[in-house]
Image (cartoon, rainbow, N blue to C red):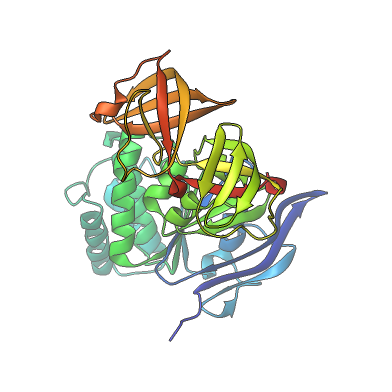
Amino acid sequence: MATSPILQLDKVSKSYGDTFAIRNVSLNVDQGQLVCLLGPSGCGKTTLLRIIAGLETLDSGTISFGGEDLHGIAPHSRGFGLMFQDLALFPHMDVFGNVGFGLRMQGMSGDKVRARVDEMLELVDLGNYRNRKVHELSGGERQRVALARSLAPAPKLLMLDEPLGSLDRVLRESLQVQVRSILKEIGVTAIYVTHDKDEAFALADTIVFVNGGEIVQSGPPEALFRAPATEMVARSLGLRNIIEGTIVGAFDAIEIASSVGTVFTAGSLPGGISVGDGVLVIINERGISVAPVRHEWAEAEAGVKLSGIVSDRKFRGGESEIHMMVGQSELVSIIPTVDAQTGVAPGDEVSVLVPAEAVTLLPRAQA
């Protein structure tokens, strides 16, 4: 039997003067789900988080948690946890004091505070740090102390606003794995705000793409990457092979005349698109192959064969990024560096294989 979402937003709006910060947002979050609000700076992600927390009042719409309308319920009475980028750790307290602060404010007895703090520090792998001062901690250790403090009161919902944003990329990527593992281990429902698509992909069960105060698209990370709803979403997800085309046939496969040449995709035409219509064509960077121009593709390597000229080649560790002019547009291919077919250099003429499964379409009107 299907269960109701634990958190429900229905047509929530918030404006400041004549400017909408949030417009008509509806969102359902299931128990134990980790939802990432993804979008550019200023798109409304943090405002939406603060509205859910009760730190901002909404102008219209409703928010309910566990079936209870949150209207009029004070932030401290909602039982939600918050973790922000600045962490707000108390410098005059040690790790134990910081993690146990909220528990003491709730009136929990000393023995129970000690037991709960020790449990949380073990959870974030800081079991031996209870007596350390804040200034003695590294950036990553401070992040984990702040996470332990947020989790200690056992919040019904945990909200995190770019908590790893101040860290360098290597440490941030390491902590992303830890944060997801910890949140999943305890089963807390969480909403995580970020403008970093890689962070959202590493953490989320569901990504909610926000722009201009509105939800543009939501779904599992894989689904968004395979089928972005708009050009803006596609580019924000890092997809670069986005070109113009026109539908010229739709029989066994959809045939598209594009700025790189004729390509095909399987399936049926997206709603609202007919033969003769202009479209945006997305070609998956990891779905196309590149080889020297005289390469003979095997029969199993099905797809359209196009010709191009390599304009640049970048090494990315285990992968190579090859930029090519194909027809009137540039295409980028990302393939394993060890692949023999990567033996091409700028200026080389190459053969480019574009299989039907690497091609998806968007209505041009949605750009």
Residue farthest to the left, as pictured: 128
Check the picture and name the quadrant holding the C terminus. Answer: top right
Q: Is residue 3 above or below residue 132?
A: below
Quick one: 353 or 332, which is closer to the camera?
Answer: 353
Say left or right for 331 vs 230: left
Quick one: 149 or 38, which is closer to the camera?
Answer: 38
- Residue visible at 75% across and 53% down? 15
Residue farthest to the top, as pictured: 347
Q: Is residue 126 above or below residue 9?
A: above
Say left or right for 226 vs 48: left
Quick one: 130 or 122, which is closer to the camera?
Answer: 122
- Residue visible at 69% across and 45% down? 364
Residue farthest to the bottom, as pictured: 1
> In the rendered image, is residue 168 in sight?
no
- Residue visible at 46% across and 82% down? 3
How many numbered marks does the figure carry?
0
Quick one: 233 or 361, which is closer to the camera?
Answer: 361
Image location of residue 324, percent across then percent down: 47, 23
Image location of residue 279, percent across then percent down: 66, 45
Image quarter for residue 56? bottom right
Image location of residue 250, percent across then percent down: 60, 55
Check the picture and name the quadrant holding the N terminus. Answer: bottom left
> In the rendered image, is residue 304 in sight?
yes
Image location of residue 229, percent across then percent down: 59, 52
- Residue visible at 44% across and 54% down? 221
Q: Is residue 315 above or below residue 213?
A: above
